[in-house]
Amino acid sequence: MEISEVRVKMVSNKDDRLKAFCSITMDNEFVVRDIKIIEGTNGYFVAMPSRKMSDHCEKCGGKNHLRARYCNNCGTALKDNRARKDFKGRMKLHADMAHPINSDCRKRIQEKVISAFKEELEKSKQPGYKPVEMDNPDDDIPEIVS
């Protein structure tokens, strides 16, 4: 697998640990969006895209995030600590939507993404800097010329 493109969108909040969002294109054929670049205690790291975990109300069956205290549908009080715990005993509130299967793949992705982030960080310090536009999914679709 070759990472053929990395797009980095800097986040402007200076006090937050979240530094940027990015998307990666693999083999010029497959895109993964909403990868986060986070500043940790040991430097930058990559967090893969995830979604909030949810469950259903016992009374009405309405869908609710695991931290919700009341059902979004009927208002019934929900039980505390509905989330499963991970191997460290922490509540599992998010699930990865896409992630590498092994540590070698994770390392390749992280190195490529962090490198692109550092390049974009340097560019952002230049006068006239224009941030990368990432909001248009149609950018990923090649134009068909007949």
Image: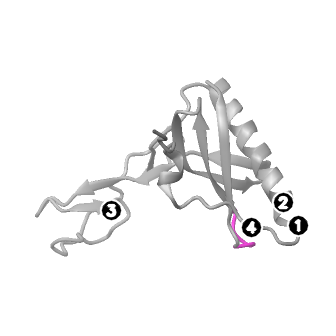
| Residue 67 belongs to the span the image colors magenta | no
Magenta range: 13-18
* Residue picked out by circle 3: 80
Q: Nearer the viewer, mark 3 or mark 4?
A: 4
Q: Is residue 64 above or below residue 140?
A: below
Instruction: State the image coordinates of residue 32 (x, y, percent, origin top left).
Output: 53, 43
Quarter where residue 68 is shown: bottom left
Instruction: State the image coordinates of residue 11 (x, y, percent, origin top left).
Output: 68, 66
Distance of label 1 from label 2 (alpha carbons):
5 Å
Q: Residues within 10 Å of mark 4 (few under 14, many from 20)?
A: few
Residue at screen point 61% across, 24% down: 1
* Residue picked out by circle 2: 123
> Hey, what amino acid is under mark 1?
Gln
Sequence-wise, the earlier of marks 3 and 2 is 3
Distance of label 4 from label 2 (alpha carbons):
9 Å
Q: Nearer the viewer, residue 8 or 98?
A: 8
| Residue 130: assigned label | 4
> Hey, what amino acid is under mark 4?
Lys
| Residue 14 belongs to the span the image colors magenta | yes
Quarter where residue 60 is shown: bottom left
Q: Residues within 10 Å of mark 2 (few under 14, many from 20)?
A: some
> Hey, what amino acid is under mark 2?
Lys
Residue at screen point 50% across, 45% down: 143
Contact (Cβ within 8 Å) of mark 3 with mark 4: no
Distance of label 4 from label 1 (alpha carbons):
9 Å
* Residue picked out by circle 1: 126
Contact (Cβ within 8 Å) of mark 1 with mark 2: yes
Instruction: State the image coordinates of residue 50 (x, y, percent, origin top left).
Output: 47, 49
Q: Is residue 117 left or right of residue 93?
A: right
